[in-house]
Image: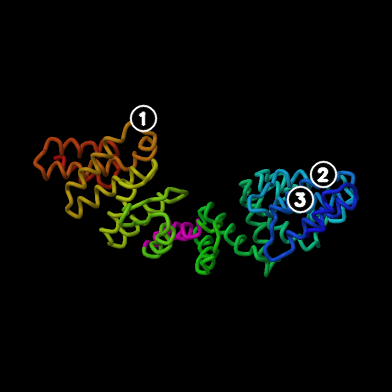
Amino acid sequence: ETQLKALSTGEGENAARASLWLARVYTRPAEKDYATAAEVLGRAVESFGASSVINDLRFDFANALMARPEPDWKNSLSALQQIQVDGTFSQLAEVLSQRAVCLQKLGDYETSLAANGEFLARHGEHPLASEARFMRAENLFLLGRLQESREAFEEFLTTEENHPRRDSATFRVAQIHHAGGLWEECLATAVPLFTSNPDGPLYAQLPFIVGDSLFRQEKWSEAVGPLQDFLATRVTTDTAQGLTVKAGPNVDLAITQLAVACDRTDQKEKALTHFRTITDHYPVPTSQLPLALSELGRLAYESGDRELARKALERFVASDTAENEIFAKHAPVQRPRVRYYLGWLDAEEGRHEAAAARFGEVIALDASHSLAPDAALQQG
């Protein structure tokens, strides 16, 4: 290493080759130092553009930039494109493959997809072809071309029996089924994967899509477990901070679904607790609030907690304004139920005119609502 360092500081072909091998010293041992390798290669690429090993330097530079702790996809792509334009490098297949990776990481899914297609057309039997097939399916998924993506992932799963990305492909198929509302198909794909408990951020939504698919089929008791698993790291309680909710994709929906599932399985206290997580603790505005307030009011009334019931239902009414976009969009279906239970609260408190007005509002809002006949009866 010391000799290579000394040689790499010189000029000419020997210095270029010394820089190449010095960088490889950092990338060959068990504990690889790609950041240092990238620094060495970056200087060499700038200094030895006329060297016979310039493309080797560029290729190793691109790979080091991709592999370092904070990848630099943009400069890696630039180096790979320079190699491709030159056209004389012995590993052009690998260059094209890595170029597709960089493009995908940079969010240019169309161009990455085109690079996948070019690679497979030219190098269909290459050892990296299976990776290109997976990446092609992934690019289609990221472009929202879900039917094509599902077919590509299913083809990948059929042909690649031992590939390390099989779980990732299986999860994508489950996601596509879920997005299409194909609950049975989603569960058939997702449950075995969920049972195997795969590790990694890709699978963060796996418990949710299992729980949601069961919930959509009204399999209430079966939905509880996966929904609880999904929320385990997102809704936490400790003695110092109390209940803390970490907002994120589908977190509010999962809490609401868990509350409904508990209600349907006669776990009323748990249902109340989960609805209050939305009404009292959710840290950002949520479309689930109108439903949560309505159901909290109903459950509290049915359990005999009239104070909590009135608080939830009156908060709904106070929040339900034209300026409140969440309520304007999500409150209409809940309005008759809210007025109905407010009517009963008023009646029990002897406020008969107010109660009659509330029951009348139920009918005015939706005469075909399931509560409308009783509201008409109570209105008198």
Q: Is residue 200 above or below residue 363?
A: below
Query: Which numbered mark, 3 or 1, is in the foreground of this view?
Result: 3
Q: Secondary structure at mark 3?
A: helix
**220 or 6, which is in the foreground?**
6
Residue flagged by tag 1: what amino acid is it? Glu
Residue 274: give x, y in percent of width and height: 32, 54
Q: In this picture, which residue range is highlighted in magenta?
A: 205-220
Q: Residue at x 26, y 39 (%)?
A: 315
Residue 214: give x, y in percent of width and height: 43, 60
Q: Residue at x 70, y 48 (%)?
A: 102
**In what quadrant of the picture does the C terminus appear?**
top left
Q: Earlier in the sequence, mark 3 or mark 1?
A: 3
Q: Earlier in the sequence, mark 2 or mark 3?
A: 3
- Quadrant hosting residue 259: bottom left
Q: Is residue 274 above or below residue 311?
A: below
**45 or 222, which is in the foreground?**
45
Which residue is disc 1 drawn over? 323
Which residue is disc 2 drawn over? 82
Residue flagged by tag 3: what amino acid is it? Val
* Residue found farthest to the top: 323
Which residue is disc 3 drawn over? 40
Query: Which numbered mark, 2 or 3, is in the foreground of this view?
Result: 3
Residue flagged by tag 2: what amino acid is it? Gln
Residue 349: give x, y in percent of width and height: 10, 43
Q: Tell whether position 216 is magenta.
A: yes
Residue 313: give x, y in percent of width and height: 24, 42
On screen, residue 351 versus residue 2, left or right, reads: left
Q: Secondary structure at mark 2?
A: helix
